Amino acid sequence: MRLDFNVLWVEDNQSNVHAQRDRIKALIRKEGFRLQVKFASSVDQAKEFLSDDIYGDHIDLILMDYDLGPGKKGDEGLAEVREIFPYKDIVFYSGMAPSELMNKAVALDVQGVFASHRNDLPDIVEGVFENLVRKVLDIDHSRGIVMGATSDIDQIINDLLLGLFDKSDEVFRKTSLASVIERVEQKRVAFHETANTIVAITHLNELMEHHGVYTSDDRLRLLKKSLTQLDLFKSHHHRLDGYRTEVMPKRNDLAHIRVVTDGFSRKIFDRKGVELTSNDMRALRVKLLEYQECFDELVALYADN
């Protein structure tokens, strides 16, 4: 499950909507989601994007300007997009009154369209966004989002560790493996049989088979130790500690929650018996999004290094 809210924005002059885009981004960010925009400058270009099944399936909302310069107008675009996606939400906007826009949509028998003046676009999008993500804002679904996003970060950590190991010299490799063995030795009493297998590894790739013993926390510790030893990306080191203390414990709690059902109401309690509210989950999504972007930056820095 993703934290991105993907918008196809059909607008021939992006400078006309910079302020609206920034406000929409801020409104969505408050709920712990990240606005991702793909601009199309014409109806035909928008149709090209939407004809790609992989891309089109991940579009959450379409924003369609009426006046797109030379070529097809936005109302023609509405009709053509609606043929491709009969049930996709579309916000139709321009500098004219929303009632005039709706008349143009109705004239072409296009249903399920929200009309907005350009200046009011952020408010309309916020309302559509809230309706679209109401289910994922439910605490059960929020739990799935957090678990899915942290799993993605776990994979990034694995990839970074393997990349550092494969590209480094023999001295670093020996040190890295020694760090693994040191950590595993601390767990030998509780996980004797599996730990013996890990002690014999010759490549970090073998480590990925033993999540139960060499955990996500251990891998994150190893990643920070490796980056420190290699003197890489110092500005991100404290963020790795923050992820360990601010997100991972809460992620672990979500894996062991207790659900109490009372009619249509569902309440969720952590291992200490403390109820988790929708506000708690919103705050966790916002924090998780910040750290996900931190790890994305690490991947980009590593690729450029």
Image (cartoon, rainbow, N blue to C red):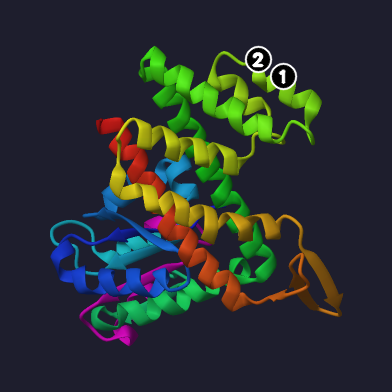
Who's the residue at 20% across and 80% down the image?
Answer: 95
Q: Quadrant of residue 143?
A: bottom right
In this rendering, does residue 228 appear at all?
Answer: yes
Position above or below: 173 against 208: above
Q: In the rendered structure, does residue 302 fall within the stretch colored magenta?
A: no
Disc 2 designates what residue?
200
Report the front residue among 85 and 193: 193
Q: Amino acid at mark 2?
A: Ala
Who's the residue at 81% across and 68% down the image?
Answer: 259
Report the front residue among 27 and 245: 245
Q: Amino acid at mark 1?
A: Thr
- Asked if the residue under mark 2 is in contact with the one under mark 1, i.e. CB atoms within 8 Å, the reply is yes
Q: Which stretch did the figure color magenta?
A: 80-108
Q: Position of residue 128 (x, y in %)?
A: 47, 74
Report the front residue among 258 and 105: 258
Question: Which element carries disc 2, helix, strand or loop?
Answer: loop
Category of crowding for the residue at label 2, using alpha-carbon neighbours closer than 10 angstroms: few (below 14), some (14–19), many (at least 20): few
Who's the residue at 43% across and 22% down the image?
Answer: 165
Disc 1 designates what residue?
197
Report the front residue among 76 and 65: 65
Category of crowding for the residue at label 1, using alpha-carbon neighbours closer than 10 angstroms: few (below 14), some (14–19), many (at least 20): few
Q: Quadrant of the C terminus?
A: top left
